[in-house]
Image (cartoon, helix red, strand yellow):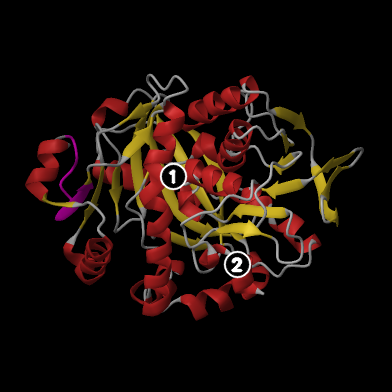
């Protein structure tokens, strides 16, 4: 690829992927405009970065395309007290996704996903640290590690996870129940063992961090237009067009970083990308953030808790149900029950929230050019790890846009794999 400066870039999406990409491009001296129907600085706006678990998880190499999980899926779906749920009215729309998922749910695919998640996850913290040198993260980030706990019920799965992480060189330290309670004495000991990832960190306010990065992007000369983008196309070799209902914008290159909403645009470009959503929930227990010092995830329940500035945030569950179904009270109840199982001291909850994780059936993101439109670059599909991968995605995508060489193998993240 020729190494030259782009004349201009348009980015659709002001979430963590879009904002980090915009910032990196501006630092390369490339003019950038970010589009979104919501303003990231608005206090009314509650995007994925507002509601996520706030974990920076460089260890999270294993995803859901695991044969050991597949066996339990039917049981989980028919249990109201389980980490997985399905909106039955949405099944026909997910048929294509499920076919791809079944095709990718085997040991070989699981290890392929783990290897290429590790490739980018291992760079993720350093990419954020570079940004943190330039913004004020006082009271916004804590570096105390992240703990996972489990019962002896699914030890085969736990041993698999530990082995895959060890084989990839992921830092992890196994803990007994007693060692967990030394670190987190308020926990109800309903678990048998766990692991701490000591080099992981967490956000006290993920949306607060996004706002700081966005302000830096604007300060450096980045533009933002609040507008609902309806279409994107490549007109000529050096011209892409981004359209809203009323306006047409022309850029040399464009980036689609619209998370779960990206499929609307990729469908228009004639690509068969089976992007769908995992719906995730949270509640807050105000004033209870001192009960634990770091995030704690209970693997048996598929849920976790993070101490945040808004209180103790309880998050979790995977609900397959698209973008339009309403919030499920059963999922909220499930999270509350799980939280109170680990911390019986909890009482009233606040702030019920539903967000959308953009998920592909092999659980790798799409990073790279559109198949038929080389100047339209994709940056979406990061599932549970959108927050963790924001800064490194910004570095990768800005490098692609600027035509720089990379020593990363980016082929596994191409949309080619679905077409």
Please name the residue that numbered disc 1 is placed on. 388
Where's residue 94, x and y in %?
63, 69
Question: In this rendering, would 181 be left or right of 259?
Answer: left
Percent x, y of residue 85: 49, 61
Residues drawn in magenta: 186-196
Q: Nearer the viewer, mark 2 or mark 1?
A: 1
Q: Quadrant of the C terminus?
A: bottom right
Residue depicted at 43% across the width and 36% down the height: 128
Helix, strand or loop for the magenta stretch, by majority: loop
Which sits in the foreground, 330 or 397?
A: 397
Q: Secondary structure at mark 2?
A: helix
Q: CA distance from mark 2 to mark 1?
A: 31 Å
Q: Is residue 189 magenta?
A: yes
Residue 113 got which mark?
none
Examine the rendered structure and indicate whether residue 419 appears above or below residue 64. Answer: below
| Residue at 57% from the left image edge and 23% from the top image edge | 216
- Badge 1 local density, few (<14 within 10 Å), some, or many (20+)? many
Crowding at mark 2 (Cα within 10 Å: few <14, some 14-19, many 20+): few
Snapshot quadrant of residue 343: top left
User: If you read the primary sequence from the N terminus, does the residue marked by circle 2 or circle 1 appear first?
Assistant: 2
- Residue 100 x, y percent position in the rendering: 56, 76
What kind of element bears circle 1?
loop
> Looking at the image, which is closer to me, 265 or 241?
241
Q: As rendered, which of 35 and 1 lies closer to the eye?
A: 1
Q: Identify the residue shown where x is 75% and y is 56%.
A: 264
Quadrant of the frame with the N terminus: bottom right
Q: Which residue is mark 2?
A: 88
């Amino acid at each position: 690829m020729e190494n030259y400066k782009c004349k201009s870039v348009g980015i659709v999406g002001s979430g963590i992927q879009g904002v980090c990409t915009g910032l990196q491009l501006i630092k390369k001296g490339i003019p950038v405009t970010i589009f979104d129907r919501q303003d990231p600085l608005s206090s009314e706006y509650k995007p994925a970065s507002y509601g996520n678990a706030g974990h920076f998880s460089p260890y999270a190499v294993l995803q859901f395309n695991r044969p050991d999980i597949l066996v339990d899926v039917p049981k989980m779906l028919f249990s109201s007290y389980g980490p997985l749920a399905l909106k039955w009215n949405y099944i026909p729309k997910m048929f294509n996704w499920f076919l791809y998922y079944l095709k990718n749910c085997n040991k070989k695919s699981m290890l392929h996903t783990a290897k290429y998640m590790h490739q980018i996850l291992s760079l993720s913290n350093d990419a954020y640290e570079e940004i943190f040198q330039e913004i004020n993260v006082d009271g916004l980030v804590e570096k105390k590690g992240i703990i996972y706990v489990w019962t002896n019920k699914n030890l085969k799965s736990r041993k698999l996870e530990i082995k895959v992480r060890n084989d990839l060189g992921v830092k992890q330290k196994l803990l007994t129940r007693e060692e967990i309670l030394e670190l987190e004495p308020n926990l109800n000991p309903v678990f048998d063992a766990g692991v701490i990832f000591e080099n992981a960190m967490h956000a006290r306010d993920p949306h607060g961090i996004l706002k700081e990065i966005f302000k830096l992007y604007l300060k450096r000369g980045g533009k933002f237009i609040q507008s609902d983008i309806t279409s994107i196309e490549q007109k000529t070799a050096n011209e892409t067009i981004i359209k809203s209902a009323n306006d047409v914008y022309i850029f040399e290159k464009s980036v689609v970083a619209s998370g779960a909403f990206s499929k609307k645009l990729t469908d228009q470009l004639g690509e068969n990308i089976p992007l769908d959503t995992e719906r995730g929930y949270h509640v807050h227990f105000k004033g209870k953030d001192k009960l634990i010092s770091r995030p704690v995830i209970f693997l048996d329940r598929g849920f976790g808790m993070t101490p945040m500035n808004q209180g103790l945030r309880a998050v979790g569950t995977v609900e397959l149900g698209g973008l339009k179904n309403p919030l499920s009270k059963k999922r909220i109840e499930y999270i509350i029950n799980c939280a109170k199982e680990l911390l019986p001291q909890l009482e009233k909850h606040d702030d019920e929230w539903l967000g959308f994780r953009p998920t592909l059936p092999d659980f790798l993101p799409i990073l790279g050019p559109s198949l038929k439109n080389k100047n339209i670059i994709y940056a979406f599909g990061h599932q549970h790890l959108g927050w963790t991968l924001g800064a490194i995605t910004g570095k990768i995508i800005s490098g692609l846009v600027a035509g720089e060489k990379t020593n990363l193998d980016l082929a596994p993240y191409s949309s080619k794999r679905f077409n």
